[in-house]
Image (spheres, rainbow, N blue to C red):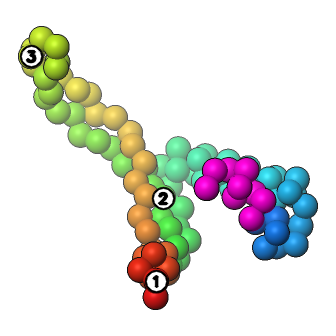
Amino acid sequence: MNKSELVAAIAEQAGVTQADADGVVNALFDVVSTTVAKGEKVQIPGWLTVERTIRSARTGRNPQTGEEIKIPETPAVKLSAGSKLKSAVKGG
């Protein structure tokens, strides 16, 4: 499902226009991204947790030359499924 299909499904389920649903979806993405960028966790109990993590610095290899390179620590995003989402995926 892509974003436009998601917006259409939400609009139909909620009985609102696609423009209204699109505004809500955009607002949700904006709030989640700015909150996580600040280092705060977004939790929707039972459904989803989104948080910022730091990937540790490490040593890697250049695949073309085999030369060892240092990879700096980098921020990353971690998504965790909650119990309701896991149950829905299992079909229960």
Residue 21 within the magenta-colored segment of the rendering: no
* Residue 88 x/y as whole percent: 49, 79
Q: Does the CB distance between marks 3 and 2 fall below 8 Å?
A: no
Residue for badge 1 = 91
Residue for badge 3 = 66
Q: From which residue to which does the magenta span run?
A: 1-9
The reply, left or right, for residue 39 in relation to residue 7 is: left
The residue sitting at 13% across, 28% down in the picture is 59
The relative height of residue 5 versus residue 33 in the rendered view (above or below) is: below
Closer to the N terminus: mark 2 or mark 1?
Answer: 2
Closer to the N terminus: mark 3 or mark 2?
Answer: 2
* Amino acid on which the number 2 mark rests in the picture: Val
The residue sitting at 59% across, 47% down in the picture is 33
Q: Give the label, 2 or 1, closer to the camera.
A: 1
* Residue 79 x/y as whole percent: 43, 58
Residue 4 within the magenta-colored segment of the rendering: yes
Marks 2/1: CA distance? 23 Å
* Amino acid on which the number 1 mark rests in the picture: Gly
Secondary structure at badge 2 equals strand
The relative height of residue 55 versus residue 43 in the rendered view (above or below) is: above
**Res 44 visible:** yes
Q: Give the label, 1 or 3, closer to the camera.
A: 1
Estimate how packed mark 1 is, as few (under 14), some (14 to 19) or many (20 or more) residues with alpha carbons within 10 Å: few
Residue for badge 2 = 50
**Res 24 visible:** no
If the image is split into quadrants, where does the N terminus sit?
A: bottom right
State the predominant SS element of the stretch in magenta: helix
The residue sitting at 71% across, 55% down in the picture is 5
Q: Give the label, 3 or 2, closer to the camera.
A: 3
Marks 1/3: CA distance? 46 Å
Closer to the N terminus: mark 1 or mark 3?
Answer: 3
Secondary structure at badge 1 equals loop
